Image (cartoon, rainbow, N blue to C red):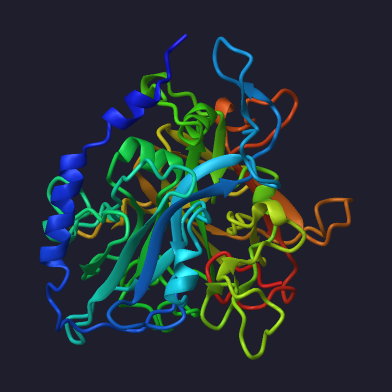
Amino acid sequence: MRNHSSSMQLNRRNFLKMAGSAALLTAGATAMPGMLRRTLLPEAVAQAQSPYDLYYAGTDGWVYLPPTPQIFLPGTQTAIHPDPLAPAPFNTYIFGFRNVSALTTEQKNNQKNKAQHNAPLFWLDQFNPSNPVDFRMQVTNIGLALRPDLFDAHTLHWHGFRNVIPFFDGEPTGSIAVPTGANFTYIYRPRDPGTYMFHCHVEDVEHVHMGMTGLVFVRPLQNGNTSLYASGKYAYNDGDGSTGYDREFAMFLSEVWAESHWSDAHIQLPEWSDYRADFALLNGRVYPDTLAPNAPIDAGASVHALAVQTVNNPGQPDNGDLVPPPGRPELQYQPHSSRITCQPGERVLLRFANLGFKESAITLAGIQMRVIGRDATLMRGRDGTDTSYETDTIAIGAGESYDVLFTTPPFSGGAGSTGLGYDSYLLYNRAYTRANNLAAGGFGGQATEVHVYPNGALAAQQYPNDWGI
């Protein structure tokens, strides 16, 4: 058995690098003060606030995963899942980000140990040279409540983003890392539409796996043109409406190796070469929790509801914490549903991104998918040749993203004879070890369902992953 010692945990931290990052941060904090900003409506911000458009905080926290199977430290009778340190109703320790854009300084600091998994997704419009407005994202590091001995810095690396300058790249040896208590503002010009992902790049194997990850996408300049597709919504600047869609759903793939999460909570050092994914997650949950509702959302601003006391809501605690999905308090910090709802004849856009360490084979049983984009690149040759293709399975490697369209089939009368009011199709990872949580007799992991309702049953979608019900 390995010797998981706390001294090893401390030795791996590069204190000198941290000190250097703090010095660079101080020197660079006022860089480019005159750049223009714009108001966004991402899932994570209600309004632009000077000097940033979006404000995330890095910290730790707890989430819920199925308590079976019980998992033990290899070669011992030490239970590592469910974690005995976890406060009810949670059972798994994580690192992660939280949106703190609308919070006061006191409320922001109260979010320590309340990380979200996965991080709030956000989106923005493609940079328009005729109206040059930059996107500013501020990141703060409020520290780890359970592990104050870990003084890791954090960064935000926009994975696959082609145009970021090294200063704002988030890879800590060539740019800025944010030490505990500090802030740094990243400045981006998102020139290429498509689906991306972001993650912390400090101690990146650990921080990515522990949950400091999220999904971001860039909407094309073509959006709003209803002459090419009636909805005026597109995945890319296609010029012909071929990437137009009616509804969109984000599908973020990640994994949990229970031993590493237990080790970070219990002041131990995981041996990453022993990596074994016990749980495969879709939008931070495993099936059937992937079908549970989204957390309450302010649809006008696309912001997850916060427990903030206001004049109109005097009964709420004034702490800025997330409000859990209805009837599911254990999913408080896993707010994103993966359930897909649609009506016959609609085009549905699925945005997949994989920040697990394993390749996934995602299958949509009974419906053909068309791959229209990979790694934020339209499937089209330099000479304009259409290279999109139809399939029922897409193989997504670590760090890859796919944009996929399907056309909703006719409504057959409500899932056969079940009387559910919708037809149901299964979307799942056909890689066996990521489709059952390694649990005996229980299907789970990276899976969700497509629910097809009769025409007129759903309202227009107001934000990604909105059910319209």
Near-viewer residue (173 or 442): 173
Left or right of 7 on screen, residue 469? right
Is 407 drawn above or below residue 375 in the view shown?
A: below
Near-viewer residue (309 or 386): 309
Residue occupying image coordinates x 40% and y 21%? 5
Give the image location of residue 200, x and y in percent. Answer: 32, 49
Q: Is residue 235 visible?
A: no
Give the image location of residue 393, x and y in percent. Answer: 50, 40
Q: Is residue 160 visible?
A: yes
Give the image location of residue 208, x and y in percent. Answer: 38, 42
Tally the numbered discs.
0
Residue occupying image coordinates x 45% and y 68%? 108
In the displayed orientation, state which residue is furthest to the bottom. Answer: 311
Left or right of 429 on screen, residue 100? left
Residue occupying image coordinates x 46% and y 72%? 106
- The picture quadrant where one finds residue 280 is top right
